[in-house]
Amino acid sequence: MLCPSLVFTRLKRGEEVYGLLNSVPSPLLCEMIGYAGYHFVILDMEHLLRGGDELMHCLRACESAAVSPWVRVPEVDEKLIGRLLDAGAEAIVLPRVESAAEVARAIAAAQFPPLGRRGITGGRGTGFGTLPLAPYIELANQQPRIVPMIESAAGIEALPEILALPGVAMLLEGALDLALDLRLGPDPLHPDVWQALQGMAAACAAAGVAFCANPRTPEQQQYWRAQGIRSFLAGEDRGLLHNALKARLHDLKSTPNP
């Protein structure tokens, strides 16, 4: 049943939040991430072919482990956004956003009239009728649910208009795709990219919108903390798991024989 967002409640209290991109489709892994202490999981649909049943099991697993389930969609699809929110997604992540118009469409798809165009249904969001429709609509419309990602020069140019929209919950950066778009190669640590990320964070601070940093070095983490950033993405589970598996195997192979 729909409840106030634990992520944004923590941010309002001045606390930090930590998230992880889920690129290994597995309800068990989602549950594990929650018990590891993360506050939100971004279930990826941009680069993965996920079935409806698997996604529903992941949403339930997140709920059981008290970690907020967010979903990254491949594009602004109003009907898909509505179905995901009906299924229990707390927020919708929009990749490679390049205009305020597409974000406005997503916001309208996430809000009920008179604020938006989302269609009403019962089901999981209302606890199958436990929560009456009027307070359900009010609660759903109170919490912004759209999280754009800026991953291109066009997105940076459109950022002031995007941040001016009511209904933007948070902003995510995509440094690797931004580096490629800027013709810098696959180098998310390039100085031009780092400068662009700092500009994004400053624009968010001026607009009163949370900026979610994805620190790639200890120095970046220290910088973001010094700037008062309280939302952090820890990368993706696929890379973390792969590196941990390789490191463990290396440790076993390098242990000297007695």
Image (cartoon, rainbow, N blue to C red):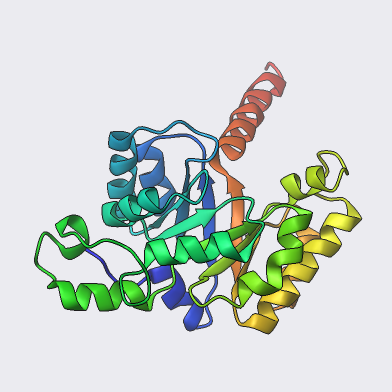
The residue lying at 90 percent from left, 56 percent from top is: 191
The residue lying at 59 percent from left, 50 percent from top is: 95
Residue 226: x and y in percent read 75, 76
Q: Assign the C terminus to one quadrant of the image.
A: top right
Q: Quick check: 195 left or right of 172? A: right
Residue 110: x and y in percent read 38, 63
Whether residue 55 is situated above or below residue 165 in the rendered picture: above
The residue lying at 48 percent from left, 73 percent from top is: 167
Q: Nearer the viewer, residue 220 or 95?
A: 95
Whether residue 146 is situated above or below residue 51 in the rendered picture: below
Q: How many labels does the image show?
A: 0
Q: Assign the N terminus to one quadrant of the image.
A: bottom left
The residue lying at 69 percent from left, 68 percent from top is: 159
Furthest residue to the top? 257
Answer yes or no: is residue 67 visible. Answer: yes
Q: Quick check: 256 left or right of 132? A: right
Q: Which of 229 and 104 is in front in this view?
A: 104
Q: Quick check: 197 left or right of 38? A: right
Q: Quick check: 176 left or right of 51? A: right
Furthest residue to the left? 129
Residue 133: x and y in percent read 16, 72
Which of the 4 image quarters holds residue 138? bottom left
Q: Which of 63 and 70 is in front in this view?
A: 70
Residue 107: x and y in percent read 45, 66
Answer yes or no: is residue 221 visible. Answer: no
